[in-house]
């Protein structure tokens, strides 16, 4: 199965902007994180399940290329797709699209590790294999 593309819409509010009225770059990182967690929930791994099973997905690496500047009030869609998957790590590709003209605003990448707390939240994390159920739900990277 081809990799699933998760879509999340956002309206660029004043709190997401810098004093010039354009997107403040950390907003892209917050939206990548939100999209990752929402994608996992769609694939059957919502936050409640992650907490119950003492799982987490610490961030290993992130990057974002800023291509155009959306403005206050713009409608944006975040499109997130599996980029690669290993034994216990995976990377998601995020594209930020200006709705209405399909303009690519930014392109980001997050690398994460699938990990379990040794004895619950607050205790050390250990990497663990990405579950087959999640692999199937995410699909195969392009």
Image (tube, rainbow, N blue to C red):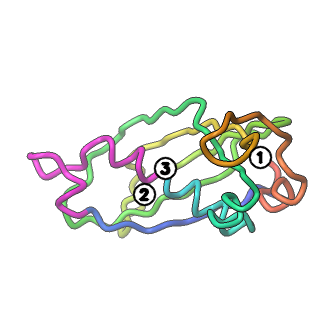
Coordinates of residue 82 in the picture (x, y in percent):
70, 48
- Mark pair 2, 3: CA separation: 13 Å
Marks 2 and 3: CB-CB under 8 Å? no
Question: For the N terminus, which image quadrant?
Answer: bottom right
Report which residue position mark 2 lands on.
97
Tell me which segment is drawn in magenta: 13-32
Classify mark 1: helix, strand or loop.
loop
Depicted 85 relative to depicted 31: above or below? above
Q: Residues within 10 Å of mark 1 (few under 14, many from 20)?
A: some
User: Residue at 74% of width from left, 39% of height from top?
Assistant: 84
Q: Residues within 10 Å of mark 3 (few under 14, many from 20)?
A: many
Q: Nearer the viewer, residue 103 or 41?
A: 41
User: Residue at 20% of width from left, 52% of height from top?
Assistant: 17
**Residue most extreme to the left:** 19
- Mark pair 2, 1: CA separation: 20 Å
Upstream in sequence: badge 2 or badge 3: 3
Report which residue position mark 3 lands on.
32
Residue 123, image quadrant:
top right
User: Residue at 38% of width from left, 47% of height from top?
Assistant: 28
Report which residue position mark 1 lands on.
141
């Amino acid at each position: 199965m081809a990799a699933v593309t998760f879509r999340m819409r956002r309206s660029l509010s004043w709190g997401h902007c810098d004093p010039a009225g354009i997107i403040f770059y950390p907003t892209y990182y917050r939206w990548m994180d939100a999209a990752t967690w929402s994608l996992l929930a769609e694939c059957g791994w919502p936050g409640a399940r992650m907490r119950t099973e003492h799982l987490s997905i610490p961030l290993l690496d992130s990057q974002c290329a800023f291509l155009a500047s959306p403005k206050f009030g713009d409608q944006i869609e975040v499109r997130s797709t599996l980029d690669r998957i290993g034994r216990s790590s995976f990377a998601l590709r995020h594209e930020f699209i200006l709705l209405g003209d399909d303009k690519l605003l930014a392109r980001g990448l997050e690398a994460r590790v699938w990990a379990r707390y040794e004895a619950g939240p607050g205790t050390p994390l250990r990497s663990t294999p990405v579950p087959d159920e999640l692999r199937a739900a995410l699909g195969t990277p392009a």
